[in-house]
């Protein structure tokens, strides 16, 4: 459903934007209003109608009554206050799910304007969270942290026992989960993926010593034409740490509407505790590394160190697309996974586990480390592992002789149907 809808919305966006480009209007505010209205129309069509969600324009309101900058589009829930004699609203920050800055032409000055506005809105949310101390279901942030680090703490109290660096990762992921999604959307501007990457890199370089330009201030998504920059914050996209480095930003040159829907629908499913079926294809987005980051000590505190992963047009074009597939496991790994699934977690010091490994002739520590590295298990503490996902693990024995394991039931169902379809067709042909 998601990919099909994204394709429809992308075609609608292209067609309507082309019509706007032919309008003989020179008044800049009116031109901006047209593109903002088109964006709100697209967002209206992107939201499941059964949910208590609206798309409006106006101002976010902080817990202290402070208003943010005028916002081109907001995805909101609950109730807001109309601004008299306008179509705008003032909406409390705690009920704002996503905010959009829309630009007809996205280049340096417009990028700065949008970045600054969205950063201000993020600061208003942080002030609300620190003052009102609202309660959130942080399970999605715990899951994102596990996918990033291979560790799945049981509680915030257990997080406080981790290193200062890993606590920084966790707290960033929490704010990324609970704060509003922040999107910059440019209809024209940087002409290709390489140009958008370079423009954003130049902007960060110009402001790398300024206060308020930490990783948390970056938008979740920057769209320009058919290209996009995405923050890998676990909602839902993330990558695992590699030698201490996290691929925090990536780029894409396919359909940015698909990525936008992934972000919005993930947030809606968390907000309303509703299952929203998203995956309708095994084709994965092609994500090119853009900025890597790690936490470093800068006395008397810590800071985010960024490393620009430079790729030219030829290198970007050479990055292949990929299809999702579950992890194939061997007999020993499948036994470990079934033990973890049955008990909820496994004590790797267990005499039974160690005896089994010795009898079967495999290294138990290496086997566990591989399953953690491949995203099937995560460490709860120094001695216990658990499934990476809240839903647990799916293990299947395929007619091909493969044993597969995954924590993603939607993708697993599609993959198995795809694998079994040729076999079913052959069986039908043989019987006829």
Image: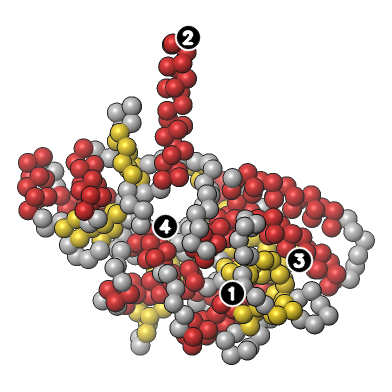
In the rendered image, residue 415, in percent from the top left (x then y), is placed at 44, 37
Task: Determine the secondary structure under disc 1.
Answer: helix
Mark 4 vs mark 2: in front? 2
Image quadrant assignment for residue 87: bottom right
Q: Which mark is residue 36?
A: 3
Task: Determine the secondary structure under disc 4.
Answer: loop
Which is more N-terminal, label 2 or label 3?
3
Which is more N-terminal, label 3 or label 1?
3
Alpha carbon distance from label 3 to label 2? 58 Å
Task: Tell me if I can see residue 429 in this picture.
Answer: yes
Q: Which residue is mark 1?
A: 95
In the rendered image, residue 314, in percent from the top left (x then y), is placed at 57, 47
Instruction: Examine the rendered structure and indicate whether residue 344 appears above or below residue 361.
Output: below
Alpha carbon distance from label 1 to label 2? 60 Å
As drawn, is 222 to the left or to the right of 412?
right
Which is more N-terminal, label 2 or label 4?
4
Alpha carbon distance from label 4 to label 1? 29 Å
Furthest toward the right, the residue is: 24
The crowd level at tag 1 (other Cα within 10 Å; few <14, some 14-19, many 20+) is some
Task: Give yes or no for contact between labels 3 and 2 (Cβ–Cβ under 8 Å).
Answer: no
Task: Give yes or no for contact between labels 1 and 2 (Cβ–Cβ under 8 Å).
Answer: no
Task: Give yes or no for contact between labels 4 and 2 (Cβ–Cβ under 8 Å).
Answer: no
Which is more N-terminal, label 1 or label 4?
1
Q: Which residue is mark 4?
A: 239
Total numbered labels placed on residues in the image: 4
Q: Which residue is mark 2?
A: 432
In the rendered image, residue 282, in percent from the top left (x then y), is placed at 49, 41
Task: Determine the secondary structure under disc 3.
Answer: helix
The crowd level at tag 4 (other Cα within 10 Å; few <14, some 14-19, many 20+) is some
């Amino acid at each position: 459903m998601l990919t099909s809808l994204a394709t429809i919305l992308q075609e609608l966006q292209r067609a309507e934007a082309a019509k706007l480009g032919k309008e003989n209007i020179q008044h800049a505010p009116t031109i901006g209003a047209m593109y903002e209205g088109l964006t709100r129309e697209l967002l209206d069509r992107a939201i499941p109608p059964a949910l208590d969600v609206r798309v409006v324009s106006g101002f976010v309101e902080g817990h202290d009554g402070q208003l943010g900058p005028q916002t081109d589009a907001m995805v909101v829930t609950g109730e807001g206050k109309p601004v008299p004699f306008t179509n705008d609203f003032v909406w409390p920050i705690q009920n704002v799910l996503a905010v959009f800055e829309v630009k007809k032409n996205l280049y340096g000055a417009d990028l700065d304007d949008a970045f600054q506005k969205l950063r201000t809105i993020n600061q208003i949310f942080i002030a609300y969270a620190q003052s009102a101390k609202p309660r959130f279901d942080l399970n999605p942030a715990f899951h994102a942290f596990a996918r990033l680090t291979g560790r799945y703490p049981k509680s915030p109290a257990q997080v406080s026992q981790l290193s200062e660096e890993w606590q920084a990762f966790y707290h960033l992921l929490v704010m990324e989960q609970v704060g509003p999604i922040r999107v910059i959307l440019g209809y024209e501007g940087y002409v290709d993926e390489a140009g958008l990457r370079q423009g954003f890199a130049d902007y960060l370089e110009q402001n790398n010593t300024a206060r308020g330009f930490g990783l948390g201030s970056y938008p979740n998504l920057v769209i320009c034409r058919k290209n996009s920059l995405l923050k890998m914050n676990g909602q839902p996209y993330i990558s695992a740490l590699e030698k201490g480095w996290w691929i925090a930003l990536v780029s894409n040159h396919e359909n940015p509407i698909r990525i936008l829907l992934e972000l919005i629908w993930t947030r809606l499913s968390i907000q309303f505790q509703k299952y929203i079926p998203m995956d309708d294809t095994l084709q994965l987005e092609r994500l090119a590394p853009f900025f890597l980051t790690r936490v470093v000590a800068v006395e008397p505190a810590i800071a985010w160190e960024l490393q620009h992963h430079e790729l030219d047009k030829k290198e970007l074009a050479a990055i292949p697309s990929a299809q999702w597939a579950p992890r194939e496991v061997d007999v020993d790994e499948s036994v470990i996974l079934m033990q973890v699934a049955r008990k909820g977690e496994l004590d790797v010091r267990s005499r039974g586990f160690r005896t089994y490994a010795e009898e079967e002739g495999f290294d138990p520590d290496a086997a566990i480390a591989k399953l953690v590295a491949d995203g099937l298990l995560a460490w709860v503490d120094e001695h216990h592992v658990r499934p990476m996902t809240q839903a647990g693990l799916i293990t299947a024995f395929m007619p091909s002789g493969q044993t597969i394991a995954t924590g993603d039931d939607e993708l697993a169902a599609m993959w198995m149907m795809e694998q079994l379809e040729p076999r079913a067709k052959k069986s039908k042909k043989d019987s006829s």
